[in-house]
């Protein structure tokens, strides 16, 4: 049986790892901030010793080779730390450090085929997502933070995903408190904390949507601190349009038609 391997790209303080360990045989956590990576290693020392958790304290790259690169650690909100250089008006909020980098493809080659990849890399999500798809890496489940429609567009354009779901980061602790999940050992109840990426796959509430219907949801909900989830093993119901009435009331048809046309989707 193929082992289930989850890649937590942008692990931050490790708040997702406990859940991922319940869902997979192995978890690979990537975190650039040395302080947070050390915190993860201390908290999950036994899981690391057992080989169930691998912690990569590096700046994730899509280029081969390893070298030191600039990374920008936010001075007050570590969740906002990032690899791309911040804008000139925000640069004073960050501390610039030089850290080792490592290519995502080398990490996957070393650890195995992904079952789920979670991407939360602050303004670098689309770069990694595009690189994965261009190299035919399409796990059964994938998610990325969506501050632009590009994330969803890349998932659709890859041609490998036909079912989508939207998770609102702000509501995770409330919506998924004492939530029933499916683990590798059966069902359990689990509560997701603040800043958690929340559940994935069949642990998500609601139905999976087709690309067309998901786009309508996105038009209503807008972008921001929201994760787009995609899968190729759960079938969406084409007739399931839970936001149809809201769309007609609040979003002009011309808006989502224009978006559909720009992305090559059916109107």
Image: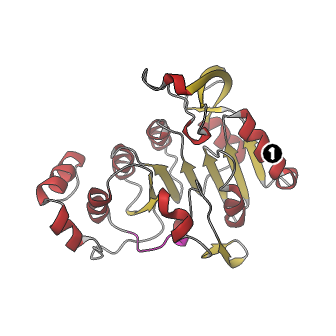
| Number of callouts | 1
Q: Main secondary structure of the magenta part?
A: loop
User: Which quadrant of the figure has residue 184?
Assistant: bottom right
Check disc 1: other Cα within 10 Å, few if <14, some if 14-19, many if 20+. some
Q: Is residue 88 above or below residue 1?
A: above
> Residue 149 appears at what percent x and percent y?
33, 46
User: Which quadrant of the figure has residue 81?
Assistant: top right
Which residue appears at 68% of the width and 24% of the height? Answer: 99
Q: Is residue 88 above or below residue 190?
A: above
Q: Quadrant of the C terminus?
A: bottom left
Q: Quadrant of the N terminus?
A: bottom right
Let me know if residue 3 appears in the view.
no
Which residue appears at 44% of the width and 40% of the height? Answer: 126
Which residue appears at 31% of the width and 57% of the height? Answer: 218
Let me know if residue 78 appears in the view.
yes
Q: Which SS class for mark 1?
A: helix
Direction from residue 26 to residue 51 in the image, left or right: right
Direction from residue 161 to residue 220 in the image, left or right: left
Indicate yes or no whether the magenta region holds residue 198. Answer: no
> Residue 80 appears at what percent x and percent y?
54, 38
Question: Which residue is more in the foreground, 33 or 187?
Answer: 33
Stretch of the chain drawn in magenta = 202-208
Indicate yes or no whether the magenta region holds residue 205. Answer: yes
Which residue appears at 15% of the width and 55% of the height? Answer: 257
Pointer 1: what residue? 41
Q: Is residue 14 above or below residue 185?
A: above
Direction from residue 257 to residue 228 in the image, left or right: right
Question: Which residue is more in the foreground, 61 or 217?
Answer: 217
> Residue 3 appears at what percent x and percent y?
70, 61
């Amino acid at each position: 049986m193929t082992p289930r391997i989850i890649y937590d790209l942008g692990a931050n303080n490790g708040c997702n790892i406990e859940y991922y360990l319940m869902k997979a045989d192995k978890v690979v956590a990537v975190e650039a901030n040395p302080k947070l990576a050390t915190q993860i290693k201390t908290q999950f020392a036994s899981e690391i010793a057992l080989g169930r958790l691998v912690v990569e304290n590096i700046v994730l790259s899509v280029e081969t080779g390893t070298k030191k690169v600039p990374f920008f650690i936010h001075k007050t909100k570590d969740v906002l730390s990032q690899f791309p250089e911040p804008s000139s008006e925000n640069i004073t909020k960050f501390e610039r450090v030089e850290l080792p980098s490592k290519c995502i493809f080398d990490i996957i080659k070393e650890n195995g085929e992904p079952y789920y990849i979670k991407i939360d890399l602050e303004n670098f999500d689309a770069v990694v997502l595009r690189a994965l798809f261009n190299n035919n890496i399409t796990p059964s489940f994938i998610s990325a933070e969506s501050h632009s429609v590009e994330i969803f567009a890349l998932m659709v354009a890859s041609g490998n995903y036909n079912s989508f779901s939207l998770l609102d980061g702000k509501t995770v602790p409330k919506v998924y408190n004492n939530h029933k999940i499916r683990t590798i050992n059966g069902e359990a109840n689990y509560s997701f904390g603040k800043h958690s990426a929340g559940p994935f796959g069949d642990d998500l509430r609601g139905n999976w949507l087709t690309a067309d219907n998901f786009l309508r949801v996105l038009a209503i909900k807008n972008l921001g601190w929201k994760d787009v989830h995609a899968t190729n093993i759960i079938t969406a119901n084409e007739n399931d349009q839970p936001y149809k009435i809201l769309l007609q009331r609040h979003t002009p048809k011309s808006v989502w038609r224009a978006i559909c046309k720009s992305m090559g989707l059916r109107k």
